Structure formats: C-alpha cells, structure tokens
Image: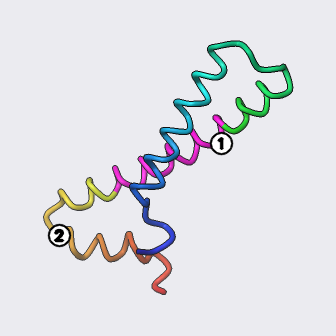
Amino acid sequence: MSKKQANPQQFEQMIAELESIVQQLEQGDLSLDDALAQFERGIALTRASQQQLQAAEQKVQILLQPNAQEQLTAFDNPAGE
C-alpha cells in the first residue's frame, strides 16, 4: 500500500480520537490551554480525515468511469514513478 492511499484503520483511529476530543471539550472540564490544544488536535485530525475521504471519493469516481483501470493507474501514480 502506498503512502498516498488511506489506511482504513488509521482513518477509524482518527475518527475515534476526534470523538474523544469532542466529548472532552463538551464536558468543559479542561483548562483553557488544554482545551485549545485539544481543539488544535481536532482540527488537524479533521483536515487529515477530509483529505482521506476526498482521495477515496476520487478513486470511486475513477472506478465508475468506463476506462477505469487506465485512469486508476494514472491516479495512483501521477508522477509516473
């Protein structure tokens, strides 16, 4: 598996961590500094998750096209490496 492809386990771990962060922030028991640190981590996880979802969506769109195998190869290896 290339580094560009999403690892489902990592994605699920990110979602679980996001859920934990949301719970901590909703409880309101964190200090301001801790809350800001958790918020920052949550934003980073959200962005990484969105990137993985966008990559998966692009792959699905490519697979649904008539000449999917040719385009999938181009998507997986855009630099021709």
Res. 41 image quadrant: top right
Disc 1 crowd, CA 10 A, few/some/many (<14, 14-19, 20+): some
The answer to whether residue 43 is magenta is yes
The nearer-to-camera label among 2 and 1 is 1
Q: Is residue 24 found inside the magenta-colored segment of the image?
A: no
In percent of width and height, residue 11 lies at 45, 50
Task: Write down the residue under mark 1.
Answer: 44
Residue extending farthest front: 29
At 62% from the left and 14% from the top, the residue drawn is: 26
Look at the numbered disc 1 and give the secondary structure of its residue. helix
Q: Residue furthest left?
A: 66
Q: Is residue 57 above or below residue 79?
A: above
Is the Cβ of the residue at disc 2 closer than 8 Å to that at disc 1? Answer: no
- Residue, x 55% and y 34% (percent of image)? 18
- The structure residue drawn at horizontal position 41% and vertical position 47%, both measured from the top left corner, is 53
* Residue where numbered disc 2 is placed: 67
Q: Is residue 45 left or right of residue 50?
A: right
Q: Position of residue 15 (x, y in %)?
A: 48, 39
- Of 71 and 30, the residue lying toward us: 30
- 7 and 68: which is toward the camera: 7
Q: Is residue 74 left or right of residue 78?
A: left
Residue nearest the viewer, comparing 12 with 78: 12
Q: Residues within 10 Å of mark 2 (few under 14, many from 20)?
A: few
Task: Tell me the magenta residue range.
Answer: 42-58
User: In the image, 66: left or right of 17?
Assistant: left
Percent coordinates x, y for residue 20 in the rendering = 56, 30
Quadrant including the N terminus: bottom left
Q: Number of labelled discs?
A: 2
Amino acid carrying label 1: it is: Ala
Q: CA distance from mark 2 to mark 1?
A: 35 Å
